[in-house]
Amino acid sequence: MKYVARNAGALAVALSLTALLSSTVTASADDPVRLVVGTSTLNVAYPIVTLPQSLGYWSDEGIDVEVLTSGGTLQAVQLLVGGGADFVEGNVSAFLQGISQNQLPLRVLAAHGNTDWRFVVPKGSDITDAKSLAGKRLGMVSLSSGGMPLLKSYLTGQGVDPESVEVVPVGFGAAPVEAFRRGEVDALLYWGSAVAGFANAGLTFDSFAPKEWQAYPDYSLATTNAFAAERPEVAVKLARGMMKASLFARTNPDCAVELFWRDHPDAKSQGPDEATSKAWDLNLLAAQTETYTSAIGLYDEEHAGGVTSENWEKMQDYLQANGLIADKIPEPDFLVQIPDFISQINDFDKAAVIAQAKECKL
């Protein structure tokens, strides 16, 4: 693929700065943990990393979590393996690619979403598949986004030379919307909640995605093999807090939005009035909770966050067929080997979390 830098110097500075931005939990816990998320902006669509702070789920577990942002999954992984973070939440295809191609010491802990990335094209556009993307300019959040390997595998699998598609980093928020409106790009490729944001901004568009993407795990939690071996209990505590937050958000999205607004007022959607802002943020959250719910189908309700061997096999088949991994990776070489990990992170009083969500104490 061709990579086109828009204001490359400014972009590099911005990404460096966002990697350093953080939201710190002040708690009585004495076990500090750094979690880096593969995004430059934390909005209401990231409840599994914001609600545990608002509701005290992590502090109840005895961990003090600092949440960092980055320009994308690849940058988040670099921060993790460089010792700048303990955990990363990002696109699992990038994790597997890093393990296969660069022997990165990553271990996947839990899958929180399935692949909900979609191509966004003008209403009535003749861009409807991989072949019609050839020769076009495609806007993406950044060149380090976890969507990059997904795009390459899709194009290659459909017989399209990735070099025939010009990838333009257009950022997040209003920037991709304006680039699309001005015709600076012919299409966009973004995840579900971002696409919901485009609709909130008044963009009219068609969208499409390969059907098989829905069967693949996507946004997932990972750590290094060394951290998982040395501090397995911390991995369980962090992931369990995230599972509680997912259940809370799915049970009462309205309350999840209110909590986000209370604790992150500067990050709420800025509509012309309060009702519109609320509707926009509910749309963003709905797109995210939909993928949380879909991801449960990768295993079952009692093993939320888990993925069956069959589904991992399908994903690796797809990545290998399209040249993103040379050989299939044995599960012990990419999945965390903490005994009963998925059972442990689901070991909490679900009825209590549901009741808490319904009561919605602000």
Image: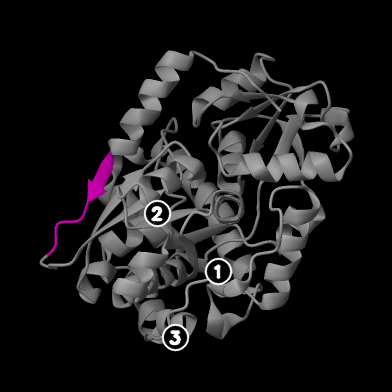
Amino acid type at image mark 2: Val
Question: Of 354 and 299, which appears nearest the observer?
Answer: 299
Percent across and percent down for residue 53 are 27, 60
Lower sequence index among marks 2 and 1: 2
Marker disc for residue 257: 2
Say which element carries label 1. helix
Alpha-carbon span between mark 3 and mark 1: 15 Å
Question: Of 268 and 278, which appears nearest the observer?
Answer: 268
**166 relative position to 305: left or right:** right
Q: Which residue is mark 1?
A: 333
Percent across and percent down for residue 201 are 56, 31
| Residue range of the region highlighted in magenta in the rendering | 21-27
Say which element carries label 3. loop
Alpha-carbon span between mark 2 and mark 1: 38 Å
Q: Which residue is mark 3?
A: 339
Which of the image's four quarters has the N terminus? top right
Instruction: Kindly identify the residue that appears in the image at 65 percent across and 13 percent down.
Output: 182
Percent across and percent down for residue 48 are 41, 61
